[in-house]
Image (cartoon, grey):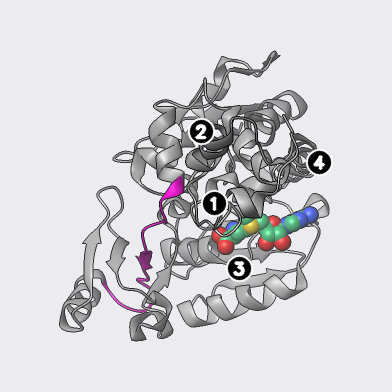
Amino acid sequence: MVIRARPEVLIPGGFDDGGVPFEEMISRPFKRLGIYLIKANCSGMKGLDRYRDVIPDFDLFVEAIRRPLPVTARINTLKTDRDRLLSRLRGAKVAFTPFIWYPFGLRLTVEKPGNLLESLMGQIHIQEEISMVSPVVLGPKPGERILDLCAAPGSKTTQIAMMMENWGLLVANDPANTRVASLRSNCERAGAVNVVVTRYDGRRFPDRGFDRVLVDAPCTGQGMARKDLKVLDRWSLKRSLGLQRLQRALLRRALQVTRPGGAVVYSTCTFAPEENEGVVSWALGQVRGVRLEDASVRGLAGSPGLAEWEGSRFGDEVERCTRYYPHQNDAGGFFVAKLIKE
Ligand SMILES: C[S@@+](CC[C@H](N)C(=O)[O-])C[C@H]1O[C@@H](n2cnc3c(N)ncnc32)[C@H](O)[C@@H]1O
């Protein structure tokens, strides 16, 4: 619904600068004037409202989206060990709370975590809690051949290198020139020395025979709204469907380059089923001999994948995927699927 509006007058602070919570933003014009809605600012809300019937405790979900993300970091065991790092933080009077579900994750009470000496030295990596999930589900082992198909800026690459204990081959691929610079410097700071950086379009990645492949796909990023509310405003079904084509091709290539018996993890930070179950169920139909494994993580709350959405039937198997909503763990939003190639 679009009715004439002058948002800057009606909503001081506006949606774009995060000054007004968006529920209030929607209701305030109605309360005061009864008629106004703002076209530019409402598309973001519309992008979330479509999930009202599938997200549990939708009101809590909306409330969580309004709050900023907690500051979180991952202990990098390539540079230090957990006990030593925790006692350093105590000594520096940095308050922290370890994650329940992952021994290397910490919530920090510090304003500029990137300025901590431990971060500059690569002993911790500032990383959103929910983004640590996909390497954990992938389960890389020392000595394996792993491909991180969409790797920059390298949060998950450095986590995978740590899980591999720097032993084996980790190919970190990303075609984006500027982002590859951050990928390289993050690997260097983390002391990840088993990483080879490549810059292929992942849809045409040339090598084969990987034990495990991570596809942390480019997406509409709705799950990152707590970091930047503007992502909601940028969402449109057209964008989701445009990305779906790329995501499908990336996942298909990932399955092709994985050895029989190997695993592929597909993850996004969006809620859009078109980019999640719509990609996974398509890939199951395209590549023979692929099945889904449970992608949930013990100690972390999540919801099953959606078997259907707006008339599209994805199939019961996709319920083995996991959707993580911000209010469930006070973190970002995420989707993870684990595919096994038989
Ligand atoms: C969600 S981000 C990856 C974040 C990264 N995994 C991390 O944890 O730091 C998605 C990445 O996909 C990359 N990308 C976009 N198009 C691609 C393509 N055709 N092939 C491979 N990667 C692509 C983008 O450059 C972007 O860096």
Residue under label 2: 31
Q: What residue type is labelled 3?
A: Pro
Where is residue 251 shown, x and y percent of the image? 71, 41
**Separation of disc 4 and disc 1 at Cα?**
19 Å
Residue under label 4: 242
> Do residues under tags 2 and 1 come within 8 Å of each other at their CB atoms?
no
**Numbered label attached to residue 224:** 1
Residue 95 located left or right of residue 10: left
Identify the mark nearer the N-term, 1 or 3: 3
Camera-side mark, 2 or 1: 2
Where is residue 325 shown, x and y percent of the image? 45, 38
Residue under label 3: 153
The segment highlighted magenta reads: 66-81
Q: Which amino acid does label 4 sit on?
A: Gly
Camera-side mark, 4 or 1: 1
**Residue 69: within the magenta?**
yes
**Separation of disc 1 and disc 3 at Cα?**
15 Å
Residue at the farthest front position:
33
Where is residue 75 shown, x and y percent of the image? 34, 68
Is the residue 38 above or below the residue 154 in the image? above
Visible residue check, residue 64: yes
Identify the mark nearer the N-term, 4 or 2: 2
Camera-side mark, 3 or 2: 2
Q: What is the secondary structure assignment of the residue under circle 2?
A: helix
> Do residues under tags 4 and 1 come within 8 Å of each other at their CB atoms?
no
